[in-house]
Amino acid sequence: MGIDLGTANTLVYVSGKGIVLQEPSVVAMDQNERIPLAVGEDAKRMLGRTPGNVVALRPLRDGVIADFDTAELMLKHFITRVHEGKTLVSPRVVIGIPSGVTGVERRAVMEAASQAGAREVYLIDEPVAAAIGAGLPVAEPTGNMIIDIGGGTTEVAVLSLQGTVLSESVRVAGDELSESIIHYMKKVHNLVVGERTAEEIKISIGSAYPTQDDEATMEVRGLHLLSGLPRTVTIKGPEIRESMSEPLSVIVDAVKRTLERTPPELAADIIDRGIMLAGGGALLKGIDTLISHETGIVVHVAADPLSCVVLGTGRVLENFKQLERVFSTRPSR
Ligand SMILES: Nc1ncnc2c1ncn2[C@@H]1O[C@H](COP(=O)(O)OP(=O)(O)OP(=O)(O)O)[C@@H](O)[C@H]1O
């Protein structure tokens, strides 16, 4: 079984079957009883809409585990759901986790998977898994650059011969882009909108670079700051792009810094092959053009950016012997 434990979404791959689960990394808890009421999509619908005694939690924040107990509970829930309560068919589990996770948290994730029935737990850094999932030839002696823009972190890495030559992780990614929209709506339109609405705005009319549908507009409902009453406001694509310019430049700067540090032979390979973009953030309109414009290098968006990490864990599982060196943490025996 391969798992992408992401800050926004968790995906599970079962060897021979493919992706069997794709759910938001959200848990709704009854605060008094400390019992989960919903996990995944059902819990995400509750974000910002819960009564006093119920909280909808995202156990991973900014690429790290912010609430360990809830993260463990969520992981167990997903593993059990995939196996429908049966014992694990294969005891081997490969988990992709953000590379910024601490040693204690790595052990905690391994512990959670062990408790759910896995006997051999391997951890793989997300950019490595994303590169494999995007189909990059990571085992060859050639430089590959991957940018994984997730919910909490953007990871930029240069890989060669199954190893990370250099990498950089910034805690600015899809969530930060949505937060910029929340601030902008409040400041310019006096409209208070929630996390989900901001994400919808980003996905529908947000962009990182001028696009053909710049004239498109969107009606946004929220709470008017001055009257305190619900109100609808019409917004345009370019103003949303402008509102996200700060986090976007943090992402671009991380890519530029990594390129500057890349050894010349590998840099030449990257110029030849181009840069690969993965993670949900890669779906933001025009982000490939922006990065290409700023670096002068061709940028490709992976075929299925949201699934790259879990597909990578699956490929590692299915080619275990050939790809054994990719793991950042192996089981202690
Ligand atoms: N079409 C889209 N346009 C823009 N952003 C999108 C789109 N689809 C998803 N996203 C964003 O992608 C992010 C989630 O990506 P992904 O599932 O790769 O993250 P993750 O793996 O859970 O996070 P991390 O890698 O930080 O742990 C969210 O911020 C979401 O808003």
Image (cartoon, rainbow, N blue to C red):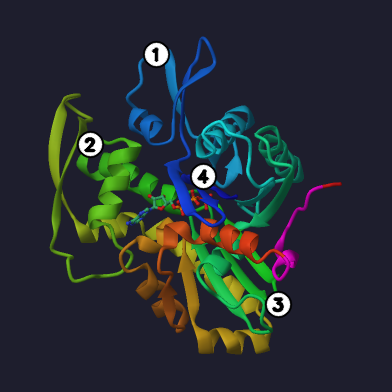
Q: Residue at x 36, y 75 (%)?
A: 289
Q: Does the image show residue 254?
A: no
Of labels 4 and 2, the one closer to you: 4
> Label 1 crowding class (10 Å Cα cut-off): few <14, some 14-19, many 20+?
few
Circle 4 Cα neighbour tier, 10 Å, few/some/many (<14 / 14–19 / ≥20): many
Give the mark, 1 or 3, whose residue is nearer the N terminus.
1
Residue at x 51%, y 44% (from the top left corner): 7
- Judge from the rendering whether residue 320 lies leftward or rightward of residue 35; answer left or right: right
Question: Are discs 3 and 4 less than 8 Å apart at CB?
Answer: no
- Looking at the picture, how far across and down is residue 288, in whole percent? 38, 72
Determine the secondary structure under disc 1.
loop
Lower position in the chain sequence, tag 2 or tag 3: 3
Bounds of the magenta span?
321-331
Q: CA distance from mark 4 to mark 2?
A: 27 Å
Q: Which of the two labelled residues, at mark 4 and mark 1, occupies the earlier sequence position? A: 4
| Distance from mark 4 CB to nearest ligand 1 atom below 8 Å | yes
- The amino acid pointed to by label 4 is Thr
Give the residue pinned by disc 3.
161
Q: Which SS class for mark 2? A: strand
Q: How many marks?
A: 4
